[in-house]
Amino acid sequence: MTKKIKDNESVKPLTDMAKIFKGGFEIIDRLPFLYNQLPKLKSFREQFSEIEKQMPIFDLPDNFNDLFAKDGWICHASLNQRVLEESINLGNTGELKEAHKLLINSVDEPYIHLILLRCRTREHFNQRLELLQLIKIDYLAERYHSCIPLLLALIDGLANDISKHIGFFTENLELELFDSMTAHSSGLPFLKKIMNASRTKTNEEEIRIPYRNGILHGRDLNFNNKEVASKCWWALASLIDWADEKKMDKKPEAPISFTDILKRYQKTCEYSQRINAWKKRPIYDTKYWQNKCIETIEKDSPEYLLLNFLDAWKNKQWGKLAPKLLHTISKHLGKEILDIKTDYSKFELIDFYIKRSEDINPSTTKIKIQIAYLTNGINFSKEVDVSLNYANQGSGFPELRGEECGSWYLMQLSLRTILFD
């Protein structure tokens, strides 16, 4: 395995290329007349300058682990960019206590809500969702003595199910993965080692690391604090990323040419430019949407997907619902249709209309709908906020709306107040 995350196969060619071009341009800069003779070279130099400004981003995961891994925080694939950058800035300026506060407080209700959303759509994690929801309640109520042991137990069991034979805290579990940020030797494997440290003596002093052996075997008696609890949630989020990457099963690839590297990077830059150029659509009032129907809405819009979904539900066309739900991507649709019929057939949809639609980011739109339905002989009318994601049709990962590889999907959890309450 590589010594640094920035030496990963998916990153190193770009950093190597940057070093080569930087050296080349330093030489050319001493001969400025060349830029006058070769206008394209000047344009390429300007493009490289913009690329060079972005290069420090590749150092961030290593910087984060250098600063915080020994304290129980590791950089993982889904880590919020703002939290990553701000904590590193604080750490590099000697404000480690403030950095730790930032990391602890970042594990808040929205953070845990996102974890639960991710668990809902992943094998093994979804089986533990009910327990995780109870743990969330305990965490937010500051009952850390309750949620910490349960999180440690669930992490152990999840690793056992995913690896199919061995728990997270077992010595023989191989967590390191090829070309991974989360499962780099300085990341999750390192976190496992410190969490799995031997605790042979009873300790009454407050601990800051979620030592599994000390807590579950009753040796560390003063573990009841927010920092330990937040690090358990952090470990769970890292485990989700590890499970996703393990499923991808990356293998070393044959070396690629600098030409191919440039093409790949150019595509990345173009994609980034499209994201930066994206703008939210105007927000219209309820009257505007009440005058809209499936025939008058743009077919590539989230509203079109939602109205089609609700229309299929109203007409009990269960087979049409499954492909429109985010959690069914890559799943066996036959089984999903049966589950959908079980959940949705309890509610007879009578009427629905959009009240408001707002673009949250380049891949997410939230739509407020008024929905009327009948269940158990009782009529209900509810206002519901529905989340729709533009996601990759193969992986389910977020995509910039409009990209050819993506489609709009509905987050079933948005309908929980109807389906599951």
Image: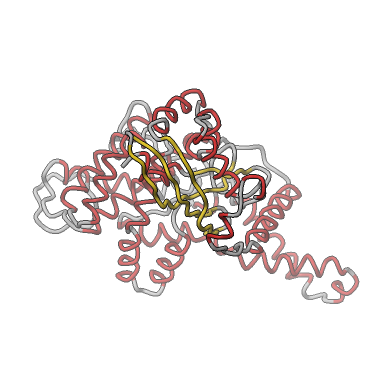
Q: Quadrant of the C terminus?
A: top left
Specify whether residue 189 is in view.
no
Display colour scheme: secondary structure
Q: Is residue 142 left or right of residue 165?
A: left
Of residue 319 and residue 187, the one placed in the foreground of this image is 319
Q: Farthest residue to the right: give it.
A: 37
| Residue 44 x, y percent position in the rendering | 78, 65
Of residue 341 and residue 408, the one placed in the foreground of this image is 341
| Residue 299 x, y percent position in the rendering | 66, 46
Q: Is residue 374 left or right of residue 171?
A: right
| Residue 222 x, y percent position in the rendering | 12, 55
User: How many labels were placed on the picture?
Assistant: 0
Residue 28 lies in quadrant: bottom right
Q: Is residue 111 left or right of residue 208?
A: right
Of residue 150 and residue 279, the one placed in the foreground of this image is 279
Question: Up-down: is 145 above or below 23?
Answer: above
| Residue 69 x, y percent position in the rendering | 35, 55
Q: Please report the residue visible at 42 percent of the width from the left and 51 percent of the height from the top.
A: 384
Question: Up-down: is 157 above or below 215?
Answer: above
Q: Is residue 219 left or right of residue 181?
A: left
Question: Up-down: is 154 above or below 207?
Answer: above
Specify whether residue 120 is in view.
yes
Of residue 73 and residue 233, the one placed in the foreground of this image is 233
